[in-house]
Image: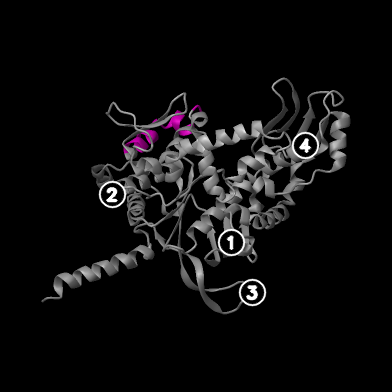
Amino acid sequence: MKIKVKNLGALKQAEFTLGDLTIICGCNNTGKTYATYALFGFLYTWRRMFSIQIPSEKIDQLLADGVMRLDIQEYVKQSENILNQGCRAYTQQLPKIFAAASERFKTTDFVVNLDIENIQLVNSYEGELGSSEVSLFSINKSKDSTDLVVTLLVEEQKFKIPTDVLERIIADALKDIIFNQFLPRPFIASAERTGAAIFRKELNFARNRLLEKIRQSDKNIDPMELLLKDYDDYALPIKTNVDFTRKLETIAKKSSFISENYPDVLADFADIIGGEYTVTRNDELYYVPKGKRVKLSMDESSSAVRSLLNIGFYLRHEAQSGDLLMVDEPELNLHPENQRRLARLFARLINLGIKIFITTHSDYIIKELNTLIMLNHDKPHLKRIAEAEGYRQEELISAEKIKVYIAEEASIILEGKTKKQKCQTLTSADIDPELGIAARSFDKTIETMNRIQEAIIWSEE
């Protein structure tokens, strides 16, 4: 999956490919968050942006005969056009994604390239629509089949189903079958996550007060418009963080595949925060330090505990294999040792099938990832070092799984031009299987500091 952007925030023109681990480094105000938020918004909204038309005669056939078949391959042939139209529709929505003025995105392009030629239709698909009392119709695709079968489960005369609803649900099924294999389900922890954690009570109080106003107001009021109005000034990733934090009591009732199959991963995370999170039946959120008989509210907990709250609940209750976990500055409020532990946790998650996307200013995270790359070779001395330093095989990572980009000013050929021009872009960083990531955005600063300190120490002589 390759993403190309033009005139997106600070980025004049850039492209990046999504790896199992994707990292964007760089100085402040160089476009890292713009690239992150734009990608999240696309993955979060693509079903609404993609348009698939279901022939009206097929709907008529379903209502008349109670069953219809669609050849999925016919829609696969249209997939490139569907994708391109979806990208154009999404680009038009960028002002809403960023909660920013439309003028900022007048010349913006956001394009996603997928490996359309290798679409696989090997998985089965099952869907059903109805109420708690009755099922109205089912949508099925058998494994390795290219047919989508839609079947009415009730007499259409008894339950009048709007044709636009039928078309939308069938189209959504086709979107999932064709594009889900390329577009992972995203979860983002934005840089504002610490504030969402500490003001959770106030957010819930504001919501409840708003609902009370709706009940007391004119019946013609649009409740969704009123509920969403207070969030219009925030970018979509921040909104989703706020909503996730507000719903922790409900989220805590679920179990992720990590919780069910890899409890040691959750133990590693508990070591990073030094305890565990808990939500009571009264929707009260606490942090319980390991080995202590005390429950701390988010106000009383450390900033590191608040910073990792959403990630902790995601891992324990929400994570699914194939997800994309996006973290803006994972190093927020973390001691260098815990930054190293987080890097090892990310590598473990990648090896379990969760993709990771991060922006970072942390040389500790990059260096720890380099260690995991360098130790991932079948050499006796490396195995001795890994064992002596406490590294496990499941934490080691292959360099081929990682993509690293530096947000910086560089000379590139702009689209439609023939000569190179210096502008803000994303430059791919070299990753050596033996030496790891060459993150020069950190190296230059470290070299400058070393030069100054050496001059201080040795210049007197």
Residue at point 66%, 42% (across, down): 225
Q: Relative to the observer, which residue lies in front, 245 or 392?
A: 245
Mark count: 4
Q: Decide: few, some or many residues near mark 2? Use Cα within 10 Å; few <14, some 14-19, many ≥20.
A: some
Q: Decide: few, some or many residues near mark 4? Use Cα within 10 Å; few <14, some 14-19, many ≥20.
A: few
For residue 416, which numbered disc appears in the image? Answer: 3
Which amino acid type is marked by label 2?
Answer: Leu
Q: Are marks 4 and 3 in contact (CB under 8 Å)?
A: no
Which comes sooner in the sequence, label 1 or label 3?
Answer: 1
The image quarter containing residue 127 is top right
Residue at point 54%, 77% (across, down): 420
For residue 4, which numbered disc appears in the image? Answer: 1
- Mark whose residue sits in front, 2 or 4: 4
The image quarter containing residue 402 is bottom left
Q: Magenta segment range?
A: 253-271
- Mark whose residue sits in front, 4 or 3: 4
Which amino acid type is marked by label 3?
Answer: Gly
Q: CA distance from mark 2 to mark 3?
A: 49 Å
Is residue 266 found inside the magenta-colored segment of the image?
yes
Q: Which residue is mark 4?
A: 165
For residue 382, which numbered disc appears in the image? Answer: 2
Q: CA distance from mark 1 to mark 3?
A: 15 Å
Which amino acid type is marked by label 1?
Answer: Lys
Which comes sooner in the sequence, label 2 or label 3?
Answer: 2
Residue 114 in sight from this viewpoint = no
The residue at the far left in this view is 461
Q: CA distance from mark 2 to mark 4?
A: 59 Å
User: Eyeballing the image, is 92 above or below 143?
Assistant: below
